[in-house]
Image (cartoon, rainbow, N blue to C red):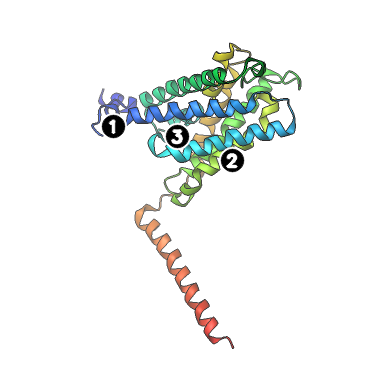
Amino acid sequence: MGNFKETLGVSELKAKNNNIWKALLAEFIGNVLLNLFGCGAVVNYKGDVAGTVLISLTFGLTIFVVVQSLGHVSGAHINPAVTCGMLATGNIKIIKGILYIIVQCLGALAGSGILKALIPEELQESGIGVTMVSSTLKLTPIQGLGVEFFLGFILVLTVCGVCDPNRPEAKAAAGLAIGLAVAVGHLVGVQLTGSSMNPARSFGAGVIANVWTDHWIYWVGPILGGISAALLYKHAFAAPSLGPLKIIERYTTVVTDEKELRRLDAKMDENMP
């Protein structure tokens, strides 16, 4: 029974130093901002290249800002696909993961609701960011599922790579790398499936617009892609554990080498005529 509670994460919620409510609030706010600003860029989208770039950069930069601002609070999943990937690899407990997904969906719903309230009705004809498989390009639902699978895959693979505890040097660039992964996914996927990458983002826009065409794709695709990427990274690509002493040694060696190079440069300058 104790092991079962540990797996669920009951003790984690009962801990005195538990900051679960701060983490849930961070996930909520992150998704509010994502749907407000990201879906805001979709408004009045005409299907042109400039619009695709605008949408891609807006979603990518929004994620970059959110990860940099809130990553220390909740890990800045801001996406059920990321949370499911972390659940599959044991990086987050079950109860906490479920709570994350709930507040992510509520945050996305609130963000899309705010967006609808702030823009004129004539600009809402595009559905304020609703994701749908392209009928113009004649994609089938299975093709749309495949697109969303790989969009979730590249995102979670990036998250795993930059958040690997044995790669501390990658942590500084985490927000930028994750934001770029989101931007890349949108550059490719906007005209194919609307490039959800994020079930909560599609849920929020879908509820506000009351459009549910092929909505299952935007849950199954990114989540399966995210779980696959997380498991692949954990079992095939994870950096080897160096231990704290090895990490210190690595950076001490780098600093020592830099000092030696500066000393040699100064000596060469002195010997030059």
Residue 52 x/y as whole percent: 69, 32
Marking on residue 76: 3
Residue sitting at 42 percent across and 25 percent down? Answer: 100
Answer with left or right where residue 101 lies relative to residue 62. left
Q: Which residue is mark 2?
A: 180
Q: Which is nearer the N-term, disc 3 or disc 2?
A: 3
Q: Which residue is mark 1?
A: 18
| Disc 3 crowd, CA 10 A, few/some/many (<14, 14-19, 20+) | many
| Disc 2 crowd, CA 10 A, few/some/many (<14, 14-19, 20+) | many
Any part of residue 42 in sight: yes
Of residues 168 and 29, the one drawn nearer to the viewer in this rendering: 29
Residue 80 x/y as whole percent: 49, 26
Q: Which is nearer the N-term, disc 1 or disc 3?
A: 1
Answer with left or right where residue 21 lies relative to residue 125. left
Q: Secondary structure at mark 1?
A: loop
Give the quadrant of the C terminus: bottom right
